[in-house]
Amino acid sequence: MAKDYTDLATDIVAHVGGKENISSLKHCVTRLRFGLKDESKADTDYLKARDGVVTVVQAGGQYQVVIGNHVPDVYAAVQKVAGISGDGALDIDEGDGPKGNLFDRFVDLVSGVFQPSLGVLAAAGIIKGLVSILAATMGLNNDNSALYAILNTAGDGFFQFLPIVLAFNAARKFRMNEFTGMAIAMALVYPTLPGTFATLKEAGLNNVFGIPFVLPAAGSYLQTVMPVLLAVWIASHIEKFMKKITPDVVKVFIVPFVTILISVPLTFLVVGPVANYASDLLSAGFTAVMGFSPLLYGILLGALWQVMVMFGLHWALVPLAILQFSQNGWSNILLAAALPNFTQTGVLLAIMMKTKESKVKSVAMPAFISSIFGVTEPAIYGVTLPMKTPFYISCAVSAVIGAGLSFFDLKNYAMGALGIFMYPGYVSPELGVTPMWIMMGFSLAAIVLSFAIQMALPVPYLYGEPTEKKSVEETKESVPELKEIKQEIIASPLIGKVVKLEDVPDAVFASGAMGKGIAIDPLDGILVSPAKAEVTLLFPTKHAIGLRTENGAELLIHIGMDTVSLAGKGFESFVQVGDQVEAGQKLLEFDLHQIKAADLPVITPIIVTNTADYEDILVTQESQINSGDYLLTTVK
C-alpha cells in the first residue's frame, strides 16, 4: 500500500507561507516547483531540515522543494491540502516563466534570451578583439587586407544580426513558433530598409495611416536588443489568439501569415517612434546636465551607460559625439562611457575566483576576455545582470570613474576603438601622452575597485545554491522479501564518457542530495536496463526513469538536464511502470541531436536514491564506458 503523504504535504504548505501564498504549483521528476507570491514568507531552513525533503532550491523565480522519486504522490497530497486544482502535473517549461517584481522579470527575460547563445556571443567578441589587434599592430583594415575583412565579418556578423538570434530564443521563451519570430527579426534588419526609409522620408512619404514610419537613431535595428524582444512578445500573443480561432486545416500557414502581417508593421510604427522619442528626451536631458555640471554628467553617464546600451538609448548621445568630433577634431561627450567594460572585467575576475559553480566559470572566462577588448554583452547578459549584484557594482564603479574622467576633462582624438585599443586615441596634440596615461590609470582603477568590492561581497549563485545532502524519505511499497546480499553490481545503461557526479551541471544532482551515483555523457540515444529490475517510475515526458533492482537498489536515470522542457519530443519509451525488465533490455530511446539543438546538456546522472540503505556506493574509474560494462557497486 502506498504511503500517506498528507502530513508531509501539510507541513510543506504551511512552511511555504500557507496556501494563500501559493500562486502556482507544478512538479518535475524530483521537485515540487512553487510559484510563491512572497518567498520571504517561506521557512527555507525548516524545509531543508524536514524529513522527507531532500533540499530547497530557489532559482529562476521558482521555489523548488526537492522530494525525490515519489514527488507525484507528494504533489497530489499538496494539491489536496492546499485546495489547488491542476490541469496536469507536468512542468514542461522547467521554470522559464518570468516571476517576481518587474525588474526580476526583466532580468529573467533578458538573461534567458541570451543564455542559449552566450558561448557564440563570447567567441564572436574574442574574434572582434583579435581583429582589433590586427588593426592596432599591423595597420590592417577592410581596404588593405582580405584576411582582416574575413575575420571582421566573422566577429562582427553575429553582433550585427543579433536581433535574429534573440528572436529565435525569445520565441522559445514566449512559447511561439521560432521561425515566425525569426521572420519578424529579419524584417527589422532587412538590408535595404535604411536606404528605402531615407528615400521615403526625403519625399515626405514615410507615413502609414498618418503614423510616422521611423527608424532608431542608429539608422537601423542592427545590433539592437529591446525592439525585437518587444516585437516577439507582441507576436506571441497574436499567434496564441490566432491558434485559437484558426481551423486546423489552414492553421499551418494562416497563423504565421497573420502574426507577421500584424507584428511587423506594429513594431515599425509603434516601437520606432517610442524609441526615438525616448532618445530625444534623453539627449536633451544629458545635454542640459552637461551644461549645468560636467561632474554630475560624468556620474550619471557612467552609472547609466550599460543600461542605456541594453535599451538602445545610447544612440541618443552618439550623434552628438560625432558632431562634436567633426567640429573640433575631438570629443568628450562619451568620455564617461569609455570604461564600464573594465568595471565588468573587475567583477568577472572576482566572480571567477570566488564562485563555486563550474558552469559560471565556464561562461565568465570568455566574457572576461571579451570585456578586455571592449565587448561586454557576454559579461552583462551571461553573468552580471542575472546575478544582479555584480551588475550594480559595475554601474556604481562606472559612476565613480565617470566622475573622475570628467574632472580631468580628457578628450578623445580617434573615435571608434574600444577596450585596450582605445588608448592611442587619447594622445593629445597639446599635452602629448599624458592624457593617455591618465586614461590607463583610470582603467586600472576601474578594474581594481570593482574587483575589490565584489571580492568583499558574496558572489550570488546563478544556477541554484548547492546544498548539503539530507536523507530522502522514500515511498515504502510492500515488496517481496529481498534476497540477502552484501553487494550488487550495476552495469552501465549507456555508451559514452564517464562524468563524476560533482561535475554534473545541476546543483541538486552534483551535491549528492538525491543520492550517490555517477553520470554518463552519452554517445548514442539508447538507454538499456542496468540490471534485472522493476520499472517504478516513468515520467510523462520520458526523460527520466526509475528502477528497483531485484536486490533492492533504487535507481533514478535522468536523461540530460532540463530536458523536461522538450515536453517529450525526441523521447520514446519501450516499457511501462510495473514492467519487469532484464539487464540489457532497451528501456528508452532519445534524440541526442534534438537535445543538443535545444542547447541542453545531455549528461545523464544514474543515482542510487536509497543511498542511505548502503554502507557505500563504489563507482567505476574508467573514463569511457559501453552498455553492460561495470558502472557501480552498492555495498551493504
Image: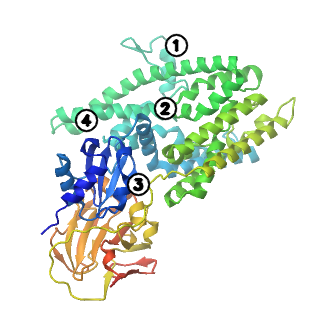
Q: Is residue 459 above or below residue 631?
A: above
Which SS class for mark 3? loop
Q: Residues within 10 Å of mark 3 (few under 14, many from 20)?
A: few
Of the image marks 2 and 4, the number of the one nearer the N terminus? 2
Circle 4/circle 1 CB separation < 8 Å: no
- Return the residue at label 1: 202
Q: Residues within 10 Å of mark 1 (few under 14, many from 20)?
A: few
Circle 2/circle 1 CB separation < 8 Å: no
Of the image marks 4 and 1, the number of the one nearer the N terminus? 1
Rendered-image quadrant of the N terminus: bottom left
Q: Which mark is residue 599?
A: 3
Circle 1/circle 3 CB separation < 8 Å: no
As shown in the figure, which amino acid type bears the numbered disc 1?
Glu
Left or right? Give the position of 215 relative to 342. Answer: left
Frontmost residue, 150 versus 481: 481
Of the image marks 4 and 3, the number of the one nearer the N terminus? 4
CA gap, disc 3 and disc 2: 29 Å
Q: Nearer the viewer, mark 3 or mark 2?
A: 3
Q: Is residue 579 above or below residue 345?
A: below
As shown in the figure, which amino acid type bears the numbered disc 4?
Lys
- Return the residue at label 2: 191
As shown in the figure, which amino acid type bears the numbered disc 3?
Asp
Q: Is residue 295 above or below residue 470?
A: above
Rendered-image quadrant of the C terminus: bottom left
Circle 3/circle 2 CB separation < 8 Å: no
- Return the residue at label 4: 240
